[in-house]
Image (cartoon, rainbow, N blue to C red):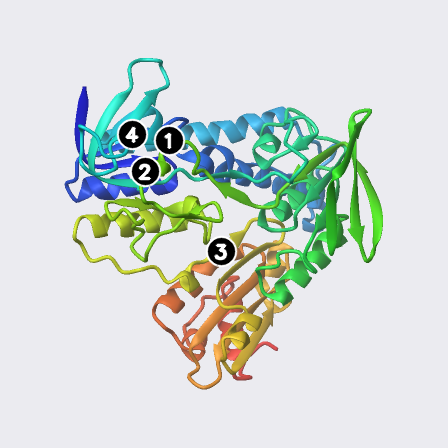
Amino acid sequence: MAEEYDLVILGGGTGGYVAAIRASQLGLKTAIVEKGKLGGTCLHKGCIPSKALLRSAEVLRTAKNSEEFGVTASDVAFNFAKIQKRKQGIIDTLYSGVQGLMKKNKIDIYEGFGRILGPSIFSPMPGTVSVEMNDGTDNAMLIPKNVIIATGSRPRALPDLPFDGEVILSSDDALELESLPESIIIVGGGVIGIEWASMLTDFGVSVTVLEYASRILPTEDEEVSKEMERLLKKRGVKIITGAKVLAGTAEKQDGSVLIQAEVNGGQEAYKAEKLLVSIGRQANVEGMGLENTDIVVEKGMITVNEFYQTKESHIYAIGDVIGGLQLAHVASHEGITAVNHIAGEEADPIDYTMVPKCIYSSPEAASVGLTEREAKEQGYEVKTGKFSFRAIGKALVYGESDGFVKIVADKKTDDLLGVHMIGPHVTDMISEAGLARVLDAAAWEVGHTIHPHPTLSEAIGEAALAVDGKAIHS
């Protein structure tokens, strides 16, 4: 039996379910097709579980350093099984909340794998969705006026080195570890790799990071990358940059893995109990019937316009499946924009230079807008202001005074071009900079905003004043 909808969304991750809620708010009859669990990668295999583990690592580190605060904590240890149980409890709570939101907004959920059909008896246009149900019952046929593809992504493997879930791990595999290895090699020094390096070194694992680029966090401001590398090395993480991993050389031997890498013109061998590959993610575009449409896929990602329409104007795509910034909050806003466009509401295209990006390592890092190098490459004459957390009272109170806030501004107009932070709780501070970017604020306006004392956010105001050499506490 076929069911008609105004909108069918393939994928119930963060982008998909947020789009569904917005569609319901606008009166559209909406359904989600999801093979796994609502909440997708972010809730079950990414953002939430990894941050839960990072928080446990942070508590452990704080307990070990408690003497600095005049507190004696003896026999500090951790129970990894309980850490994993806490992580799962958080996931379950949020998952229940998402399910409740779907019921509240009267969104139909089809548990199965959806495929887009070409023109058929159901519709003269491609877009009818056939759902292969998880429970083995007959396929459900959904006839939507519009479709949003929000199928997300999965960890990318190295050529010639497939994941085995035992020794060669993806980030998905790492989240399900029942016990921690004594040592690990992390291939990739981007956001995911650095978060895992920070977490695992806190848990006492010997960590080696192999990064192909000349620096870790290559998309962040160079000063932030340099500071992160310095602080991770200080905590015992081995970081090798300019390392081209030779995947075909990997050898599993006696409960460990040996791999070769080209470094500085030579070849080096690295050995550890496990190897975690974090070299990015690839879009889930296979098997969903794109070949039955005129949708264009380039470099493994779906091509869309500024409103997320594919070449089939009634079929949209959002989130990781279109590439770009593969972040949960980006997918959510792309979904809202797409639904607004479908419903004929105002739909302003997203300016991706206004999207905050966060790294939840220790120290944390966060940014919005252009790096200093990017601004110069785009032809701006820039001026910068930088302020260290060492001069911020609240940072000293926390015992976390490493890091800084850096602001990049246009020398001609004083407009804020980028804000870059590394230090305590900066992922909670970056939204102020995001708002400043949205409002097209000048550096002096941020500097003249009164920041309460003592707070970590004072570093933002001081860095903004420093753009014109007017910082008070430096």
Q: Nearer the viewer, mark 2 or mark 4?
A: 2
Sequence order check: which comes first, mark 2 or mark 4?
Answer: 2
Residue 300 vertical position relative to residue 400 in the rendered view, above or below? above
Q: Distance between the Cα atoms at labels 3 and 4?
A: 29 Å
Q: Nearer the viewer, mark 3 or mark 4?
A: 3
Q: Nearer the viewer, residue 69 or 51?
A: 51
- Are dots 2 and 1 in contact, CB under 8 Å? yes
Q: Which residue is mark 3?
A: 357
Q: Which structural element holds mark 4?
A: helix
Q: Of circles 1 and 4, which is in front?
A: 1
Label 3 vs 2, first from the N-terminus: 2
Gap between marks 2 and 1 measured at Cα: 8 Å
Q: Earlier in the sequence, mark 3 or mark 4?
A: 4
Give the amino acid at mark 1: Leu
Provide the residue designation for mark 4.
100
Q: 456 and 440: which one is in front?
A: 440
- Identify the residue at horizontal 49%, vertical 84% (top origin): 411
Give the percent coordinates (x, y) of residue 117. 28, 32
Query: Which is more toward the observer, 34 or 425?
Result: 34
Q: Amino acid at mark 4?
A: Gly
Which label was assigned to residue 17? 2
